[in-house]
Image: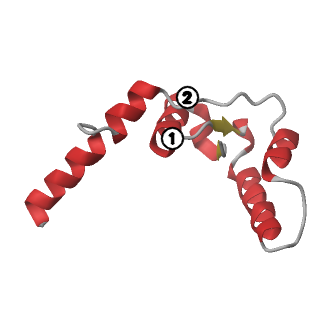
C-alpha cells in the first residue's frame, strides 16, 4: 500500500492521522514537528521522479526523512462507518441529493 504522510500542525493530533488513514484507506506516517516544508519537499521529489528526473523512491525518501516513523493503519470499524453502505459518505450524498438534487 502507498503510505500517506501527514505534515505540519496536524502531526500533533493522532486523531487527525487516524481520520486521514480512514478517509483514504491507507497507512499514514507523520513527519513530527518539522512542519509542512518537509512534506512539500517529498512531494516535489515524487513529482520529479514521475517526470523522469530520477531520485529516490518516495518510500525510501520517507524512511530517510522520517526514521523510525511507525504508520497509523486505517481502523476497519472507522472505514466501515465512513465508507460502508450505511456510512457517513452515503448518508451525506443522500442528504445532499434530497436538498439540492
Q: Nearer the viewer, residue 62 or 94?
A: 94
Query: What residue is rendered at 60% in x and 42% in y?
Result: 9
Label 2 environment density (alpha carbons within 10 Å; few <14, some 14–19, many ≥20): few
Q: What residue is disc 1 on? A: 25
> In the visual, does 28 lie left or right of 89?
right
Q: Relative to 20, does residue 52 appear above or below in the rendering?
A: below
Image coordinates for residue 18, horizontal then vertical, percent: 51, 32
What is the number of the mark on residue 14?
A: 2
Alpha carbon separation for disc pair 2 and 1: 16 Å
The kind of secondary structure element at disc 1 is: loop
Label 1 environment density (alpha carbons within 10 Å; few <14, some 14–19, many ≥20): many
Which corner quadrant holds the C terminus? bottom left
Whether residue 6 appears in this view of the structure is no
The quarter holding residue 27 reads top right
The quarter holding residue 98 reads bottom left
The kind of secondary structure element at disc 2 is: helix
Image coordinates for residue 53, horizontal then vertical, percent: 88, 72
Q: Nearer the viewer, mark 2 or mark 1?
A: 1
Q: How many marks?
A: 2
Amino acid at each position: 500500500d502507498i503510505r500517506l504522510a501527514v505534515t505540519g500542525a496536524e502531526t500533533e493530533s493522532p486523531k487527525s492521522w487516524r481520520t486521514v488513514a480512514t478517509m483514504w484507506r491507507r497507512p499514514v506516517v507523520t513527519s513530527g514537528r518539522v512542519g509542512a516544508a518537509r512534506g512539500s519537499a517529498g512531494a516535489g521529489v515524487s513529482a520529479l521522479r514521475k517526470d523522469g528526473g530520477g531520485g529516490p523512491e518516495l518510500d525510501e525518501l520517507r524512511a530517510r526523512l522520517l526514521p523510525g516513523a511507525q504508520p497509523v493503519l486505517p481502523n476497519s470499524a472507522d472505514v466501515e462507518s465512513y465508507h460502508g453502505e450505511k456510512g457517513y459518505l452515503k448518508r451525506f450524498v443522500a442528504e445532499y441529493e434530497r436538498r439540492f438534487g
